[in-house]
Amino acid sequence: MTDSDFIAEARQTYAAANAAALRWMLGRPPLHGAFLNTKMNSLTLNDYGAADGVRGPGYLYGWIQGRGLEAIVTHAAFFANTDSELAAALDVCGRRLYAALKALVASDGHGYFCYDASLRPIGFDATGTAKPQLAGGDIFTYSDAFIAKGLVAAAARYAPEELQRRLDYLAVVIDSIPAGRFQMDEKLPLAANTVGQQAPDYGPRMILLGASGLLRRIGRPDRAGFAEPFIEHVLANHLSAASGLLIDVPGTDAANIGHAIEFVGFALEHYGEAVGDGRLAQLEAILLASFHAGFVGPGIALAISPATGRPLSPNCPWWSLPETIRAASLCHARTNNPHTLAVWRKAHEAFFSHYWRSEPAIAYQTMTATGPVDFVPATPDLDPGYHTGLSLLAAIEA
């Protein structure tokens, strides 16, 4: 297949996959009458039940709901001109979810990682036992980030009069990172001493960098002034000159390959056509170095040792591949580099040959060299159109 044929076919494949995944999700009974329900085992295709504990319907993950709201709203806008029926169904779901997430946040100005059956925030102790979570106060988390982004996206589409309030919530979450008030491990009690003991991983800046692309899509790039300092911080403190990889924590020997590639994609979405040649070359180099170091088959290793080049885990999560598709397509659209196109094609082939199940339209969450395994990368709920859907949508637009 020629390069031009691949790109044309990929666009059709991505649109069809996203539409099928969204229809699957919309067809499932909502949790608490409003929240997304992707509680299915990607191996057995059985729905999780009460006997599955924290995987079951008695536990609601704010992390997933925030991601899902951003994905629903973004896809509703995309499909409005090509599939009005799907777009309308997404908007019905999106409005309902927006109201439900607003209510959760309204209690104390925070979104939380996990809620019990009564929608009370919970954490987990060392044995995995659920216990009440402390109030967030001036500590913010990844769940705040995902929920804030989702609320901003939804307010822009459904309630413009509420957008300023949602933008202010997002800004507070963003500001908590340089202020030292962002906690990464949300299962632990939310507290300043917990934040003070955590390693300086670039994950929070990488995740919130994704808000810049969202702000551009809703016509508010004026609120994205944080993005360039975040990019500069990551490159100055985490980029290894020796390996060309982003090191999770300076001075250590671990590189989360998917996070590095996700960073590249978010940075390119931030810059758009305005990316300078030097920065573009730098980001493309990180993409190429990361993919070649981490692609071990059937997918991308969760993390590798930059010193030895060896994987630190046999697990290859699904999400790194669509994130590679996003970053590589955005790079290739600007550089026309055949090496970047080759990375795009390899990631595409690996994802749709090994991870994508088609019926239903979901992906195996994790695979190893021997096949799918029952390993949960972050939350047991399947992807609500975020890593897969938004990444493939970015490639379509590229």
Image (tube, rainbow, N blue to C red):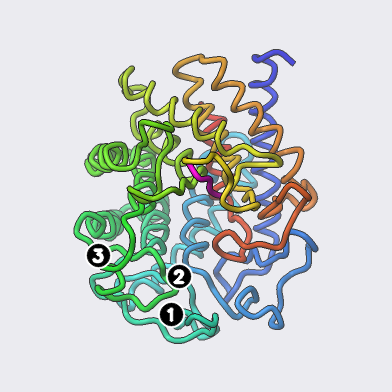
Quadrant showing the N terminus: top right
Q: Which residue is mark 1?
A: 121
Q: Are marks 1 and 3 in contact (CB under 8 Å)?
A: no
Query: Image quadrant of residue 388?
Result: top right
- The residue labelled by disc 2 is 113
Q: Amino acid at mark 1?
A: Pro
- Residue 66, label in figure: none
Residue 118 visible here: yes
Q: Is residue 202 visible?
A: no
Left of 176 or right of it: where is 342? right
Query: Quadrant of residue 230 in the image?
Result: top left
Cα distance, mark 2 to mark 3? 16 Å
Contact check, label 2 and label 1, Cβ < 8 Å: yes
Q: The magenta stretch spans which residues?
A: 302-306
Q: Earlier in the sequence, mark 2 or mark 1?
A: 2
Measured as percent of width and height from the top left, residue 362 is found at: 70, 51
Q: Position of residue 346 (x, y in %)?
A: 66, 29
Query: Which residue is rendered at x = 66% and y = 33% of the image?
Result: 348
Residue 305 lies within the magenta run: yes
Dominant secondary structure of the residues highlighted in magenta in the image: loop
- Relative to 345, say whether 61 is above or below: below
Determine whether 131 is above or below 40 in the image: below
- Residue 278 located within the stretch drawn in magenta: no
Counting labels gives 3
Q: Earlier in the sequence, mark 1 or mark 3?
A: 1
Dot 3: element: loop
Q: Which mark is residue 181?
A: 3
Neighbor class of circle 2 (other Cα within 10 Å; few <14, some 14-19, many 20+) is many
